Each structure stands twice: as C-alpha cells, then as structure tokens.
Amino acid sequence: MKLELERSGFLKVWQVAEKYASSKTTMEALNGIRVTAGSSGTVTLEATDMKSSVKMIAKGAEVLEPGVAVLNAAILGNMLKKSSAKSITLEVSGSKGTLIAGKSKSRFAVIPAESFPGIPASSGAEEICSMQASDLGRLITEGSCAASAPSDFPKYMGTCLLRTEGNKLLAVATDGRRLSCSHKDAETVNKENDMLMPAAAVKDLAKIFTGDEIVRILFDGSMVWFVLEKPAIQEGGENTETDSSENADNSENTNTDYQENADSGENTNTDYPENDDDGEKTASAPAPKESYLDGTEFSLRSIEANFPKYERILNEEIMTTLTINRSDLLSALDRVAVIAKNTPAHIIAMTLKPGSELLITARAPGLGTASETLEPKEVTGKSIQIGFNLNFLNDGLKAASSEDVYLEFSEIEGQTRIYCGKDNKDFLYMLMPIRLTPQDIVSEDDNSDFAAPEDEQAGSESQQENYGDESPQESQDNSNAPF
C-alpha cells in the first residue's frame, strides 16, 4: 500500500478515528486504525474499542498503490502532528511502514491486518430519524449533562437515552439525584423508539457534531449508528467550488478537540443572501461546503437496561422563581468555588428575596468564607435560602445555551429546575438541594469563620461522617434523591 497524503486534511480525519482506538487493552489490533486503500482511489479508516467504532472516508489521501494495513493510531498521529510538511508519502510493505515528509523519514512496525476485528455494518439497521449535526450536538450536550460515571447497578446512571416522540428527538440522563432533558424538532422521524447508550461515548459525539451535515440515526436493536451526509443543496442553489469555499480565510471552526487548523483557514457557516436591491429573493444560494466528515459512520453498542420513567417525578409546584444572566451567575460561582471546594460536599448557599439582590455564600470552617452579590433580572414568590452542590449546579448552567436562565424552586428540600428561559422549556435541568446546617451558612461574626467553636467543630466531624467517602460528583448527601 502506498498513499500520498495532504497532511492537514488527512490529519483531521485521523484524529477523529484515533479517539476510537483503545489504548487500554492488551489487544494490539485495538490500538490501531485499519487503513484500506481501494483500487477506486477511496481511502477508508476504521477504528473500534469493541463498544464503539467509526468508519470514515479519508480526505486528502491519494492512492498510489492499493492495499490494507493496520497502523498504530497514536504513533502515526504524533508523526503527522509534528511534521511541518504539506505533502507526506505513506508506504507499507509487509510488517513495516515508512513515512516520508520532505527530507525526514520514519519507519515503524505495522500491526497484522488479519488481527483487526470486524466492525458491524449499518446496512441492515432501520433508520429511526435524522437531524442536522449542530442541532444534534447541542441536544446531546444539554440532555446528557446529568449523567455520572458508569455504574454496575443501576446501569442507567451512566447512560444517555435518545427517544423519538412525534416529530421530536429527546436526550435524557440522570444519576439519581439530578435530571437533564432536551428535545428538538428532527428533520425526519420514521419510528418512535428508545435507544440507551453510554453517556461518555455520546458526549464525545457531541463535540464532533458541530456542522451542517445531516445525521441519520439507525438502530438494529443492539447497535446505534450515526451516519453523516452532506446536506441537500437548497432549491436554486449553485453547486460550485467558488461558492462553497467563500470566506475561507476568515472562517472559524469550534471543533478544536479533533482537528488541526487547515493552512487556508477553518470552516464556517456563511449566511445565505436574503433579498436583492429590489426586495426580491435572490435566485441562488451558495452550496454547503464539503465536510471532512461526509460519509462517516459512528456506531455505539446500546445498553440493555430500563431507564426510569422520569416524567412521573417532575412536579409543577413553584414557590420562588429567579431570572438571571447565565454568565454572571457562572462567574460568581467560580469565585465562590475557591472556598466551597474545601467543604466535604462543595456546598454553596443562595439567598433570594423578591425585589432584592441574590446572595451566594460559601463557608469552610477553619479556612474562610466567600460571598457574591448579584443583581437578578427578576425574583418572584417567597424569600428562600437554599443549598446546592456547586458542581451539580454548574453542570446545568454550563449546558444551557441561552443568555439568561430561569430557575424554579419548589421548596428548600424540593426540586429546583433550570430552563433556558421562562417561555423556553426545550431544555430542563432538575437537581435536588442540599439541606443546609449552621456550619454551611456564613456568619456575621468574622472570628467564627476562622475558629469554629468546639460544638460546631463536632458538628463538622459529624457531617463529614454523614457524607461518607464518595466523591462530591457522585454523591449529594443530605438531599432527597428523586429516583
């Protein structure tokens, strides 16, 4: 096998495939990526960790001699990243590979191709729905934010549920003490179905799904496929290279986790012209730019578990509401975190009064206190002082995609719900408060903040015993878990 590689374009595809090659296994083949150079000139990359896999058409690769080889993902990836050459020759002969970049030459061992496991094909799966990639990425980001690390029991805690209902696609996750749910209109829905998948793997997909490609979701009962296709050209559009690459030098692509910037700039979405000088619609629109992900198939093995009927635990009781700028609230929490993260459960206290400011405090006995005062857009209902796990609250706020967030408080030990707005309920993040104790509340006596009385110190020791040894991300003690 012999290939001529355009380094920048090929590296983008290689880095995506590299994410699916396992580095934590004794099976050498799973550390590699299978490269297939066909006689037709198409180069495909395949990688798997036996739970998830990817099959991609490699851009920027010209076939000089067809063949098949399994190459170590990390070694070749590092060689490509460190090279400054624009064009690279990759040649494989027997058990040895050679990479030539200008005057540089590297040789490396090749993994036997016959040891690479077969990757399931999507040809026999049923298409469930389709959605634009950027919409699907946002849906997954919002809907999976309440998932925690995988758990042996119950299995659903480390998962994200994708569900089709009517013309919508939903993403839902919970770890037993909080819940996230997001729904958006799909391009097409062919069947109502539930698909339960590992949350970590789904979150990785969300980082990739940032463009205007169409993602077709297929399911065969045990595997879920995400197949990316180039979006259809709008009626009257012109499929020309000039239109599709316009403004490339000034463009931007947010997918920095998986690719290096192309020498000519990164990808962006330009607005289609709306009206000409006469007020009439223009006759044509630029064709969508070809994506390096076109034709890619991601597959995930579904998890056999019963996801809880989360709709039953949501209630409509509202005691207090808060509308506030999301960035301002996150910034305040970040500053309070310096103290809050020195408490066993990372506790912060919020004090709300209608017509007044929002007060956020944290106290670490023997260390110090922190307080932040914010001007909310609106506070309605009753005055309330309520405690939260800082990490859990941050997760929901960071997942929201709006400028302002709208919070509903049931009571000091009831559900708290976060939305993107009072009239925007497409995203829901529900978490349970933490019951505050005297040691969690900032005292007006500065001396007590640094030298807690003996009875208060005893209370602190007692509370630490109650929290146990679990991580604050895995446990929110002293709260009423809904599941």
Image (cartoon, rainbow, N blue to C red):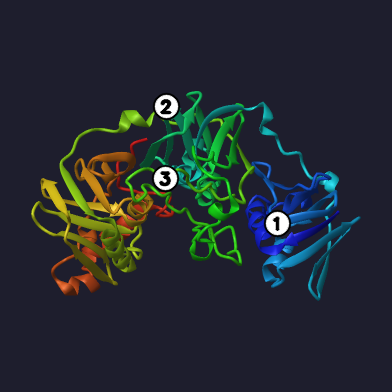
Identify the amino acid type marked 3.
Answer: Thr
Question: Which residue occupies 20% across, 45% down?
Answer: 412
Report helix, strand or loop for mark 2: strand
Closer to the chain start, of discs 2 and 1, is 1
Give the residue at mark 2: 165
Q: Is residue 260 above or below residue 353?
A: below
Question: Which residue occupies 40% across, 37% down?
Answer: 184
Report helix, strand or loop for mark 1: loop
Quarter of the image that includes the N terminus: bottom right
* In the image, farthest residue toward the right: 94
Q: Is residue 109 above or below residue 148?
A: below
Classed neighbour count for the residue bearing mark 2: other residues with Cα under 10 Å, few (<14), some (14–19), many (≥20)? some
Numbered tag placed on residue 227 in the rendering: none
Q: Using the rendered view, name the quadrant where residue 344 is placed.
A: bottom left
- Tag in front: 2 or 1: 1
| Distance in Å between CA atoms under marks 3 and 2 | 37 Å
Identify the amino acid type marked 1.
Answer: Gly
Identify the amino acid type marked 2.
Answer: Glu
Classed neighbour count for the residue bearing mark 3: other residues with Cα under 10 Å, few (<14), some (14–19), many (≥20)? some
Question: Which residue occupies 74% across, 66% down?
Answer: 87
